[in-house]
Image (cartoon, grey):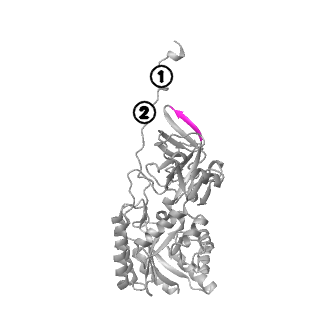
Amino acid sequence: MSAENQAPTESTLPRPVRVAPAHAPMSQFAIVNGQLMVGGMPLDRVAARVGQTPFYAYDRGLLRQKVALLKATLPRQVKLHYAMKANPMPAVVGLMAGLVDGIDVASAGELQVALDAGADPAEISFAGPGKRDIELHQSVAAGVLVNVESLRELPALAAASQALGVPARVALRVNPDFELKGSGMKMGGGPKQFGVDVEVVPQVLAEMHRLGLAFEGFHLFAGSQNLRADSICEAQQKSFALAVRLAQHAHTPVKFLNLGGGFGIPYFPGELPLDLGPIGANLHAIQAQAQTELPQASLVIELGRYLVGEAGVYVTRVVDRKVSRGQVYLVTDGGLNHHLSASGNFGQVVRKNYPVTIGNRASAAEREVASVVGPLCTPLDLLADRMDLPRAQIGDLVVVYQSGAYGASSSPQAFLGHPRCVEVLV
């Protein structure tokens, strides 16, 4: 029997390709003449300006819009802080420092970036469960607020204060006795490495007073990546009530109350944007209570992902197009080494796709079901699994939306020795 007349074997038969569920529309970036627009520029021009792929691009106009939206929603008295761990790129931090009321840092390295960006030290707070003594010393020298998370930090802060001749400004991060329901990552409630358990707060406040530290208030952060407005409102109400109760054990009035954040953005199929309306109304009610119950306190909302996540894209170029048993694979020059979150290896229990498109063919009529994989020697290097995408060719630009937070800085860029990616603010 000739080769062309042979019946196909099981190994050569194409297999049915399952199509991944669709995402909510990604409408923040316009599409003009088939090109995704970032910072008012077509994507292929942005790529030419950068000079290489892969890269992250952050749209400064979208960053400004998100801050403006929040300030229009929150009570005027409530301060908005940027948690720069979400995106510590210096240019982004510099822009945000001029838009928000304060910056929250999680290391001495981030502190230096915030100070270099021109952030007011009086409005910088430093949180983290394992602060080194030298970091505490640097914080006192800079005059920033330290969110204390352990009794161990107190003598180091007192020693720095005495050595430098300046008061150590402190707030107490509290591990509450409740969780943020529906959050993607729970930061409080139950046993946690974050903060001081609520039941030992009176002891810690007494030690702060004994050591002469300048107590300013409380930091409560119950969880993150929450798309349920009712859960966020409940956590804010409980956090405020807890702060009022704990304030009775403080030796000086509360001047600072960080109610955390937790505002999420839609990453996966079936997820819808967070409704800010009920949250704004809830904070107006809490602010009215605070005028009576904590009259000297400034309320703070600390947000990272919500401020920057939707304003960024990750862009990587197709270097090969392969078909294996009926399934199309677009092989790109970047993957989990640059975008660990999109690969599903940064906290996902069951891997789900981020929204993805072909940025230079975004409105193309011809489509296909394809998987996008990176150049690494591991099956974990997967950016899109069997998604409905515009038909792509070698040289095209794959775009991963919702990439403005926890991207480049959260990824193992040295893995397997591939080049690092570039970040630009446009």
Part of the protein shown in magenta? 319-324
**Image quadrant of residue 243?**
bottom left
Q: Can residue 25 be seen at all in this image of the molecule? A: yes
The percent coordinates of residue 271 (x first, y second) are 39, 54
Amino acid at the residue labelled 1:
Thr
The residue under the point 58% across, 59% down is 409
Is residue 79 part of the magenta span, yes or no? no
Give the residue furthest to the top.
1
The percent coordinates of residue 374 (x first, y second) are 57, 45
Q: In this orientation, which residue lies closer to the viewer: 84 or 280?
A: 280
Q: In this orientation, which residue lies closer to the viewer: 249 or 317?
A: 317
The label nearer to you, 2 versus 1, is: 2
**Quick check: 154 left or right of 50?**
left
Q: CA distance from mark 2 to mark 1?
A: 15 Å
The residue under the point 52% across, 17% down is 4
Residue that numbered label 2 is attached to: 16
Secondary structure at badge 2 equals loop
The percent coordinates of residue 62 (x first, y second) are 50, 63
Q: Determine which of the numbered discs, if any, sits on residue 196 in the image.
A: none
Residue that numbered label 1 is attached to: 9
